[in-house]
Image (spheres, helix red, strand yellow):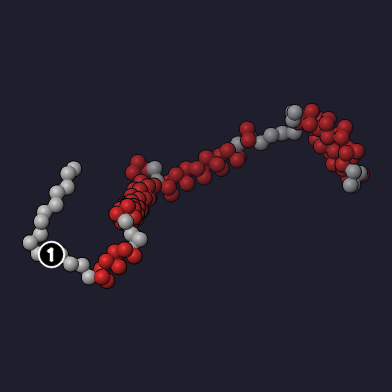
Amino acid sequence: MESSAFPSATPVQFSPQLLHALDASTETSVTRSEHKSQEIAKQVSAKLDSILSSKVMELDDTIEKSLLKTDNGVGAPMLNEKLDVVYSKLKSSAEAKIAKSDSLKAAEESVANCLLKNKGRPLNCWDEVQEFKKLAGVP
């Protein structure tokens, strides 16, 4: 880029105060550019935050509406009722109840008695605990 000087018909004079202010200024075109970039970045960030918060609110509304729908009987209250029915059936079923064998009951009682006899010294009941674990199927 080529610069050209044009002769002025009137002489240009600058006041000493203006020249002093220009000399004293620490702001350069680079710093002005940086300030503009920072200001633009702040504005973009603020706009992105507002867009993000509005989208989050929209998503929350959509999720809430979809959870509250009762179409085809699949709503939160209906689902809770169905889960309660299934839970009560499982709780009362014979398969959910585990019966202890006589040998397991005896081993459990043996561990309890040993621990009562050896208060403060549970390691004295090591053999009883190992027998109980073997019968209970605990590795």
User: Could you tell me which residue is drawn at 39 percent across and 42 percent down?
Assistant: 74
Q: Is residue 102 left or right of residue 34?
A: right
User: Is 24 located above or below residue 89 in the figure?
Assistant: below
Q: Amino acid at mark 1?
A: Pro
Q: Quadrant of the N terminus?
A: top left
Q: Residue furthest left?
A: 9
Q: Nearer the viewer, residue 128 or 107?
A: 128
Q: Quadrant of the C terminus?
A: top right
Residue under the image location 72 percent in, 34 percent down:
99
Q: Nearer the viewer, residue 33 or 2?
A: 2
Crowd band around label 1 with a 10 angstrom C-alpha radius: few (<14), some (14–19), many (20+): few
Q: Give residue 131's position: percent from left, percent from top.
A: 83, 30
Using the rendered image of the protein, determine whether residue 131 is visible from the camera's viewpoint: yes
- Residue 68 picture location, percent across and down: 37, 49
Left or right of 122 in this view: 90:
left
Instruction: Report if residue 39 is visible in the image.
Output: no
Identify the residue at image location x=79%, y=28%: 134
Question: Residue beneath label 1, please?
Answer: 11
**What SS does tag 1 mark?**
loop
Q: Is residue 6 above or below residue 15?
A: above
In the image, residue 83 lies at what x, y percent? 50, 43
Left-right relation of 94 to 55? right
Number of numbered discs on residues: 1
| Front-lying residue, 117 or 84 | 117
| Image-quadrant location for residue 107 | top right
Give the residue drawn at x 14%, y 52%.
5
Instruction: Give the image location of residue 22, x and y in percent.
Output: 29, 64
